[in-house]
Image (spheres, rainbow, N blue to C red):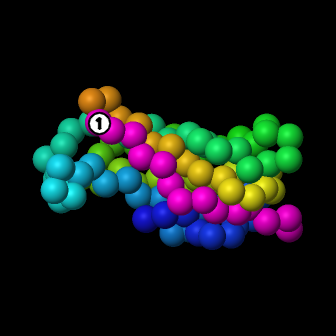
């Protein structure tokens, strides 16, 4: 699941960000054991000092890591999130915005 196109500062990103572990054919690898780390890839805030809050490292369950409590504290445009896991190719989300409340 990709982040919403627009959220507000401090608001939980909905739907929950999900990162699937895929094989070479694009199938979810349900037997994968490990964790995924998520971070801001592109900081869309004016001063490039936005902070991603929530649980930033989660264990994969049935091939999917679900980040259910992420939020960003600064408004901005074009944020992206970057997910990494040991031994796997990293993934970057589609761009999304954090609106001025």
Q: Quadrant of the C terminus?
A: bottom right
Residue 48 quadrant: top right
Q: Residue 33 at x, y = what percent?
A: 21, 39
Q: Residue at x 75, y 43 (%)?
A: 50
Which residue was labeled with disc 1?
88
Furthest residue to the top? 86
Q: Residue at x 42, y 46 (%)?
A: 91
Q: Which residues are magenta?
A: 88-101
Q: Residue 51 at x, y = what percent?
A: 71, 41
Main SS category, magenta section: loop
Give the SS element for disc 1: loop
Residue 11 quadrant: bottom right
Query: From the viewer's perspective, is 6 left or right of 15?
Result: right
Q: Is residue 80 above or below residue 98?
A: above
Q: Quadrant of the N terminus?
A: bottom left
Residue 16 in view here: no
Query: From the viewer's perspective, is 72 left or right of 60?
Result: right
Residue 13 in view here: yes
Is 89 within the magenta?
yes
Q: Residue 97 at x, y = what percent?
A: 70, 63
Is 69 within the magenta?
no
Residue 78 quadrant: bottom right
Q: Residue 95 at x, y = what percent?
A: 60, 59
Q: Residue at x 32, y 29 (%)?
A: 86
Total numbered circles: 1
Q: Residues within 10 Å of mark 1 (few under 14, many from 20)?
A: few
Q: Residue at x 85, y 47 (%)?
A: 46
Q: Is residue 10 above or below residue 54?
A: below
């Amino acid at each position: 699941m990709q982040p919403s196109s627009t959220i507000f500062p401090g608001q939980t990103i909905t739907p929950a960000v999900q990162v699937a572990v895929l094989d070479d054919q694009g199938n979810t690898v349900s037997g994968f054991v490990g964790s995924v780390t998520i971070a801001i890839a592109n900081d869309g805030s004016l001063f490039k000092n936005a902070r991603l809050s929530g649980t930033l490292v989660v264990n994969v369950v049935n091939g999917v890591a679900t980040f259910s409590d992420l939020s960003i504290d600064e408004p901005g445009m074009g944020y992206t999130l970057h997910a990494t896991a040991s031994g796997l190719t990293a993934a970057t989300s589609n761009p999304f915005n954090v609106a001025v409340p």
